[in-house]
Image (tube, rainbow, N blue to C red):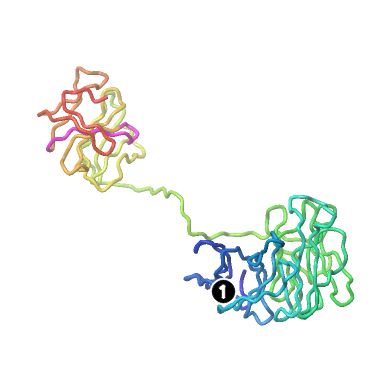
Amino acid sequence: MITPDGKQVVFISDRAGSYDLWVMPIDGGPPRRLTYHAAAEVPTGFTADGKHVLFFTNRNMGWNRAGTYDVWRIPLAGGTPVQLTTTGGRDATTPDDGTTLYFVDGASDAKVQEYKGSANDRLYRQVAGYAPEHMLMFDGNSREPSVSKDGKRLRFTREVDGSFELFVCDTEKGTCEQLTRLGDDGASNVCYSADESTAVFVWKFYLHALDLKTPGAKPRLIKVEIREDSRGETMIDRTFTNGVERASLSRDGKTVLFTLGGDIWIMDANGGSARQLTADQWHNQNPQLSPDGRTISFYSDRSGNADIWLMDVDGRTCASSPRTRPTISFSPGAPTARRLFSPAPAAATRTSGCRRLAPPTPFN
């Protein structure tokens, strides 16, 4: 929720272990924790002077009040929370410092449409020192109250034929006016502009705005451009005009392997885009493609020595045979490239999930 002065954002987070209230600058910056309790807390509004946050929580849930929420208030600057309701309540709004409080109480299931009964969500008004008063006596669900700055108008949603529509009520006369006829489950997550001229809400999974000053106005779809921190994989296109080394051609003349910037690349012999097979900090050189086109041999210092390594043509599974800058090639007499020859033998070992080979030993 944005603070009335538009400078900060109040939100809930479990970064400290439980769902507490936090506040941070609207332009970004380190968040500051407001509440410290194991029970979850949900902010719903601010006092008229913008110095306190209203929230609801079940932190005082006792053995005889299972699942009951109550409304609390805490200074935006930090401090001790103060409980405002004791008989249950949530989604509170106030035109003052919380002395006059409008809120919802009830145990209805949001998934059940057109429920009418003792568990309905109902609107209440509480004045400090007096018991909460059930408002409007509507036989159905009423939710998301928001009182005007002067305390004379109460806006809320009411379920009509399975759709939550916007209403406005005169708090002194008790008369109500229906503002929308949306259908399709109606409005949810309703909020209002600071000058009370516009309502913004979710309808049919999209954000909409409604001009409250123009009679008969229709909801307007809001186009949203989202800026976020998360990033997916980035594809980078680069053009090289030099630096290619150790190029080799496959036996059928269709594929070219080469080294560029210490990595192994592969491309079609007729030209086009090259595909990078290695992308690490090691120095990889002298790639050769096996006669069957499935395996690439090359040497690399990834194990600390300049060893022979094998990998699939897609750049995955690898195996190595330790040597010092060897000359490597596939045996012409082995069309399936089952043997790899090198100047001197070495013991077979395994490192990092790769198989080291001692030529002339089959490598698969």
What residue is drawn where x is 80% and y is 78%? 130
> Mark 1 packing: few (<14 Cα in 10 Å), some, or many (20+)?
some
Query: Which residue carries the number 1 mark?
Result: 8
Q: Is residue 112 left or right of residue 229?
A: right
Q: Decide whether residue 323 is among the magenta residues.
A: yes
**Mark 1 element type:** strand
The C terminus sits in image quarter: top left
Above or below, 266 relative to 43: above
Rendering coords of residue 127 (x, y %): 78, 78
The N terminus sits in image quarter: bottom right
Q: Is residue 235 left or right of residue 175?
A: left
**Residue situated in front as seen by the camera: 162 or 261:** 162
Above or below, 120 relative to 283: below
Magenta segment boundaries in residue numbering: 312-324
Rendering coords of residue 128 (x, y %): 76, 80
Q: Is residue 237 left or right of residue 85?
A: left
Q: Is residue 26 left or right of residue 219?
A: left
Rendering coords of residue 111 (x, y %): 74, 50
What residue is drawn where x is 76% and y is 78%? 100
Q: Decide whether residue 39 is among the magenta residues.
A: no
Quadrant assignment, res 208: bottom right
**Residue situated in front as seen by the camera: 173 or 202:** 173
Which amino acid, mark 1?
Gln
**Residue situated in front as seen by the camera: 143 or 271:** 143
Quadrant assignment, res 199: bottom right
